[in-house]
């Protein structure tokens, strides 16, 4: 964990905390931080107690040394080995042949087979490609040089891959007894650190206050600024950083500044500044956060309109030159749907955290691997502490007991289900809660189950989650393929002989309308995969929290099953329709307008 820094409590902009997280009082049954530490018999939070090193320690050292040698052999740049440069320079031998410590025999076998397959494929590709590349560069001499290099690669790379694969399988076998013992002791495997850790929500809440997400993101922004590019999505798409470049305004001579004023920007603001300011303003003005303000939706809509114009280089140029008159009859998508599509529902953030799409928009490829992992772990930690607090009403059996808990959570579900994507997200959250809790309550090794059913029920719960994950992945891939096919069909028709540029653009717009539902489906499934993965770790933290007694963990599991069922039963009020259809319709209006004219045009086009 990073050392605590006093300056973490304030930001450079006004001294205001960018992320106010205050550790809540320890719920009933939860030990104090001191007790949580002492229960580990002096072991550090990572779970490794003092004493003899594990049997795999020697093998780990050997593999680490081999990794260094092979990385040098592969010709990786020195800057990458030293960790210098931007996030794009992060490269090590593990990106090719994994030598990371495997959790057990299953993980070791999987890693080993992948490394062997990579070696064979890489060797074959090098053998076939090297002579061709050499011939193109140096003719016949280059062909024979390439043939020699390809032959060497065809021998070395498969050999390295197979050796690494065998080593990983052996390490997996060696690590299996440790895995069984640690899992039985309630510890969890940390995939980022590659070690067994002791979950402790008291220590987790303390660690969350040692830094802020904004400080981590600022490092990525600083790297982007150093290179002269924009952070986040704009930088990934080639946008320039602050001070001009792609996406910048036309200077002080713009026709009008209303849209710039709505976002609190200067006309010279870069594209990255527009996106960042919209994110901040939209969160502040979102109708969900201002339920008593009748003008909130109108202000939020105006901010969304401003963003849609200023984030589009073509529309921004027209606006700078002629103001709103230059935009013609451009229609705007509903800002609530637009914001939810980009950054996830604000109301749901307490249950799923900030989606990775939002993090991508803020920092993108400039985040280093460790920073991205740290942000995700902080997200999981915050959600785990919140979830434990939510379950406390059930665990402690307070006034009204289970009935009061059911009523309270039911009321919350009825409010959340009305948010953008509310019903779909709530059902997914409920599914993960229920299945994770069922797996924990029936697991005879790492949970509260017995061997009466030989672990059958926990296995079923695990398989149901895996099936859900595979189904979501397949749906995302299918939607992405449909988007690609619709785009290709539009381009082919637009390039047909005899079409003017205006007619070709109309053809593209028609296909874009057909593409929208598939695009939204792909976007939703990408977010769903993010939510599933995150909640799996969140539930693990809550259910394996060693700072509380086993009886409390069991009660949390029971409460989580009940909460999951409540969420899955929640239905949007009658008349609201399908959430996906609502968002799709809102997005369609961005292309065809809102009113009878648009419908008639569409019908005529058909």
Image (cartoon, rainbow, N blue to C red):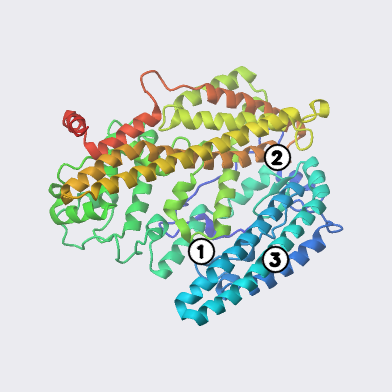
Question: How dense is the environment of label 3, judged by Cα within 10 Å: few (below 14), some, or many (20 and up)?
Answer: some
- Picture quadrant where residue 72 is located: bottom right
In the displayed structure, 260 sits above or below 123; it is above
Mark 1 residue element? helix
Image quadrant containing the N terminus: bottom right
Image coordinates of residue 23 in percent, x first then y, are 60, 43
Mark 3 vs mark 2, foreground winner is 3
The answer to whether marks 2 and 1 mark residues whose Cβ atoms lie closer than 8 Å is no
| Residue highlighted by disc 1 | 87
Q: Nearer the viewer, residue 152 or 26?
A: 152
| Residue highlighted by disc 3 | 160
**Mark closer to the chain start, 2 or 1:** 1
Q: Residue at x 79, y 56 (%)?
A: 170
**Mark closer to the chain start, 1 or 3:** 1
Image coordinates of residue 496 in percent, x first then y, are 22, 48
Q: Residue at x 53, y 21 (%)?
A: 569
Image coordinates of residue 283 in percent, x first then y, are 38, 43
* Left or right relative to 221: residue 99: right
Q: Residue at x 34, y 64 (%)?
A: 242
Q: Which mark is residue 222?
A: none
**Mark closer to the chain start, 3 or 2:** 3
Q: Nearer the viewer, residue 309 or 97?
A: 97
Mark 3 residue element? helix
| Residue highlighted by disc 2 | 545
Question: Is residue 3 in sight in this rendering?
Answer: no
The answer to whether marks 1 and 3 mark residues whose Cβ atoms lie closer than 8 Å is no
In the displayed structure, 435 sits above or below 250; it is above
* Left or right relative to 41: residue 143: left
Image quadrant containing the C terminus: top left
Q: Nearer the viewer, residue 587 or 51?
A: 587
């Amino acid at each position: 964990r990073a050392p605590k820094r006093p300056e973490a409590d304030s930001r450079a902009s006004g001294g205001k905390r960018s992320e106010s997280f205050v550790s809540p009082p320890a719920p009933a049954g939860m030990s104090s931080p001191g007790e949580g530490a002492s229960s580990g018999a002096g072991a550090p939070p990572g779970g490794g107690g003092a004493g003899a090193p594990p049997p795999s320690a020697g093998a780990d050292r050997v593999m680490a040394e081999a990794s260094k040698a092979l990385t040098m052999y592969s010709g990786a740049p020195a800057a990458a080995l030293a960790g210098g440069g931007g996030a794009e320079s992060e490269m090590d031998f593990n990106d090719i042949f994994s030598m990371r410590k495997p959790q057990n025999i299953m993980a070791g076998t999987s890693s080993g087979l992948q490394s062997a397959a990579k070696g064979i494929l890489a060797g074959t590709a090098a053998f076939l490609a090297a002579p061709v590349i050499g011939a193109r560069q140096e003719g016949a001499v280059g062909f024979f040089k390439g043939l020699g290099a390809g032959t060497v690669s065809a021998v070395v790379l498969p050999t390295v891959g197979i050796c690494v694969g065998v080593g990983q399988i052996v390490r997996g076998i060696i690590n299996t007894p440790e895995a069984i013992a640690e899992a039985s002791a309630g510890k969890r495997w940390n995939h980022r650190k590659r070690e067994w850790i002791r979950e402790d929500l008291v220590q987790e809440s303390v660690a969350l206050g040692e830094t802020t997400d904004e400080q981590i993101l600022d490092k990525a922004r600083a790297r982007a600024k150093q290179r002269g590019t924009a952070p986040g999505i704009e930088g990934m798409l080639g946008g320039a950083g602050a001070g001009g470049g792609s996406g910048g305004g036309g200077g002080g001579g713009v026709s009008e500044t209303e849209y710039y004023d709505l976002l609190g920007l200067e006309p010279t603001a870069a594209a990255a500044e527009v996106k960042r300011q919209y994110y901040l303003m939209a969160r502040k003005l979102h109708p969900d956060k201002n339920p008593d303000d009748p003008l909130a939706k109108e202000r939020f809509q105006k901010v969304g309109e401003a963003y849609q114009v200023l984030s589009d280089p073509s529309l921004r140029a027209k606006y700078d030159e002629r103001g709103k008159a230059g935009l013609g009859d451009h229609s705007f998508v509903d800002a609530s749907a637009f914001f939810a599509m980009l950054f996830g529902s604000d109301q749901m953030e307490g249950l799923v955290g900030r989606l990775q799409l939002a993090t991508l928009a803020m920092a993108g490829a400039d985040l280093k691997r460790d920073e991205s992992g740290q942000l995700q772990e902080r997200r999981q930690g915050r959600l785990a502490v919140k979830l434990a607090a939510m379950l406390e009403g059930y665990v402690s059996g307070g006034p009204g007991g289970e009935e009061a808990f059911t009523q309270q959570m039911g009321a919350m579900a009825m409010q959340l289900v009305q948010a953008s994507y509310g019903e779909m997200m709530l059902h997914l959250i409920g599914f993960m809660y229920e299945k994770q809790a069922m797996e924990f309550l029936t697991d005879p090794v790492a949970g509260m189950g017995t061997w009466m059913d030989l672990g059958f029920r926990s296995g079923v719960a695990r398989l149901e989650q895996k099936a859900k994950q595979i189904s979501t992945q397949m749906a995302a891939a299918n939607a992405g393929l449909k988007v690609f096919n619709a785009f290709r069909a539009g381009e082919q028709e637009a390039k047909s002989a005899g079409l003017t540029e205006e007619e070709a653009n109309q053809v593209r717009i028609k296909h874009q309308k057909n593409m929208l539902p598939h695009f939204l489906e792909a976007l939703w499934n990408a977010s769903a995969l993010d939510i599933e993965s995150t909640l799996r770790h969140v539930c693990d933290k809550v259910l394996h929290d060693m700072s509380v007694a086993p009886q409390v963990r069991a009660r949390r599991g029971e409460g989580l099953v009940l909460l999951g069922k409540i969420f899955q039963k929640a239905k949007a009020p009658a008349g609201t329709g399908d959430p996906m259809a609502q968002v799709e319709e809102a997005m369609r209006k961005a292309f065809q307008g809102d009113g009878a004219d648009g419908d008639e045009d569409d019908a005529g086009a058909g």
